[in-house]
Amino acid sequence: MEEQNILPFPYEIIDVTSEEQEQINKVYGSTINIYRLSRVGPKKYVVYETYKKDAAGIYNMPLRPTDVVVASYQRSGTTMTQELVWLIKNNLDYSTAATVPLKRRYSFLENFMFYDTNQLDAFMKSMDCNMDNNDLKEILTVCAEPLLDTAKVVYVARDPRDVAVSSYHCAKLYKIIRFPGGFKEFWNLFYKGLYIYCPIFEHVKEAWDKRHHPNMLFLFYEEFLEDWAGSIRRVADFLGRSLVPEEVQDLCKHLNIENFKKNKSVNHAELRQHGMLDNNELFIRKGKAGGWREYFDEEMTEQAEQWIKDNLQNTDLRYPHFKK
Ligand code: A3P
């Protein structure tokens, strides 16, 4: 028995049903094992099957009061929030930020589930990338940290339709996922909760319900875009750091999407250099709100409206920019 199996883990992890796996396989084809999915806990969050192996280890990880966790549903603005938090917590050390990739400065907690270390050879082959296994292991090395009573959490949420579009591009970006279909096929998996980390609304609602906890700061991506300086100040206040106007200006400039796109510490230059990313896609992409309109046809727009309505019914969660 592996060591982590003796650590307590209070949530059940179950396989997706064979019907669900069939729907997923129909879209993906049966490429590599990474597409085997499981569900964890009462909200039935979708994770890769490989999540099982370190779930208890992560759940039991010791925390320090100085830890700050940036949490989000994927593609909601995690990277820019991490960069901001890291800079504020590290005395605005732009020179380290410029030279050390963010993924090495800020652990990606569940990174381990994306790469089954027993299958590195198969992954390398499937990605056709130019790295040996040791380099890959080193690049994917993860250490981690979570929860509210000890650590601080900055949560960022975003219009789930824009998250869907951004997640679609991300699924095309990583050769390891290499989503073969079009957006409509992706959307069909996403809103039915058959994509990784789904269901998105449950994720956001869990954080929203804790938003008044003194160790929790709940932000919307769209609020950043509307008011960078104000949002930066909110994060700094939450972390107990006062910023002079010039420092706020510098952070605004640093986080500006055009600069961020070129910033090799955050744009996954390292993975691109190793041939792990598709040449037609970017990790830091458009950085806009409302881009989903270019992707959704009438049917998808209606599906999305109903989906949002259904999911916001029994909650006071409101996205500030959903003006009706
Ligand atoms: P798009 O794909 O819509 O452009 P995450 O970091 O959680 O993966 O989120 C990625 C999304 O945030 C992408 O959205 C990305 O372009 C956007 N993003 C990243 N950095 C940004 C920044 N500095 N300003 C605005 N948007 C940013």
Image (cartoon, rainbow, N blue to C red):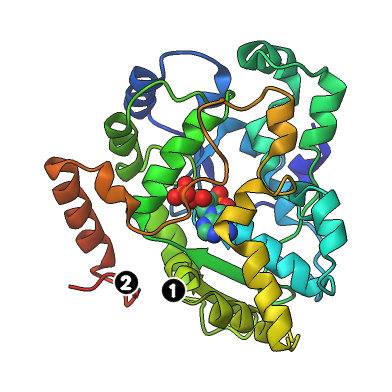
Please tell me which residue is depicted at 32% across the width and 71% down the height of the picture. Answer: 321
Image height check: is 84 above or below 128? below
Crowdedness near tag 2: few (<14), some (14–19) or many (≥20) residues, C-alpha within 10 Å: few
Q: Quadrant of the N terminus?
A: top right
Q: Which label is found at residue 321?
A: 2
Report the residue marked by disc 1.
226
- Give the secondary structure at mark 2: loop
Crowdedness near tag 1: few (<14), some (14–19) or many (≥20) residues, C-alpha within 10 Å: few
Instruction: Give coordinates of residue 107: x percent, y percent.
Output: 75, 52
The first of marks 1 and 2 along the sequence is 1
Q: Amino acid at mark 1?
A: Glu
**Along the line of sight, the residue nearer the viewer: 284 or 89:** 284
Please tell me which residue is depicted at 75% across the width and 59% down the height of the picture. Answer: 145
Residue 126 visible to an observer of this rendering: yes
Residue 10 visible to an observer of this rendering: no
**Along the line of sight, the residue nearer the viewer: 218 or 146:** 218
**Along the line of sight, the residue nearer the viewer: 229 or 205:** 229
Instruction: Give coordinates of residue 187: x percent, y percent.
Output: 31, 38
